[in-house]
Image: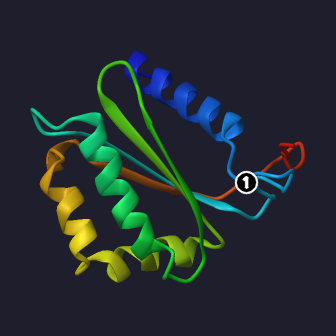
Amino acid sequence: MKPKIVKLTLVIFFMVFSSHLFANGETMFDTKTVFEILTWKSKNGVTDEEMIKAVDSMVVDLKELNGFLNQTLYKDSDGTWIDIYYWNTEKDAHDSNEGMADKDSFKKLMSIIEPETVTMKVVSPKQSSGAIQFK
């Protein structure tokens, strides 16, 4: 396995298990929650604030889709953005692509990222040591 892939895998693993998905002691996820993991690099000159604003705008539309639970955005030291979406089912995650395709918020986000750098994975849990809770 290439060192960059190993590093990205470890970063994603850490993020998923350290993420504060829900507040007030609610369960972060159970053994059925599906993760949609997207990575990309922004176009030259795009600030972190612009990227965050674009993602925040898109989340407003995502909340209208079936099965959407939450979203968390990260950025690693080489400038790669890592966006994790939490869904009830794999079908919900895949259906979101069609549901968002014509949204202005999605088009805005796509206008500030380098399309050739985009990767996407939808993963379902196969094992868990238990639900994670935050108080």
Percent across and percent down for residue 61 are 40, 75
**Could you tell me which residue is drawn at 57 percent across and 26 percent down?**
10
Percent across and percent down for residue 44 are 9, 33
| Depth order, front residue of 131/25 | 25
| Total labels drawn | 1
Q: Quadrant of residue 98?
A: bottom left
Q: Residue furthest left?
A: 44
Is residue 105 shown left or right of residue 114?
right
Percent across and percent down for residue 73 are 46, 44
| Depth order, front residue of 32/42 | 42
**Could you tell me which residue is drawn at 54 percent across and 27 percent down?**
11
| Depth order, front residue of 21/33 | 21
Note whether 16 is above or below 7 in the view shown: below
Question: Which quarter of the rendered picture does the C terminus lie within?
Answer: top right
Is residue 32 shown left or right of residue 130?
left
Note whether 77 is above or below 51 in the view shown: above
Is residue 24 shown left or right of residue 51?
right
Note whether 93 is above or below 38 in the view shown: below
Q: How is the image coloured?
A: rainbow
Q: Amino acid type of disc 1?
A: Phe
Note whether 128 is above or below 100 in the view shown: above
Q: Say what secondary structure mark 1 lies in.
A: loop
Question: Which quarter of the rendered picture does the N terminus lie within?
Answer: top left
Is residue 111 shown left or right of residue 7?
left
Q: Quadrant of residue 31?
A: bottom right
Q: Rate crowding at label 1 as few (under 14), some (14 to 19) or many (20 or more) other CA atoms within 10 Å.
A: some
What residue is shown with label 1? Answer: 22
**Could you tell me which residue is drawn at 21 percent across and 74 percent down?**
104
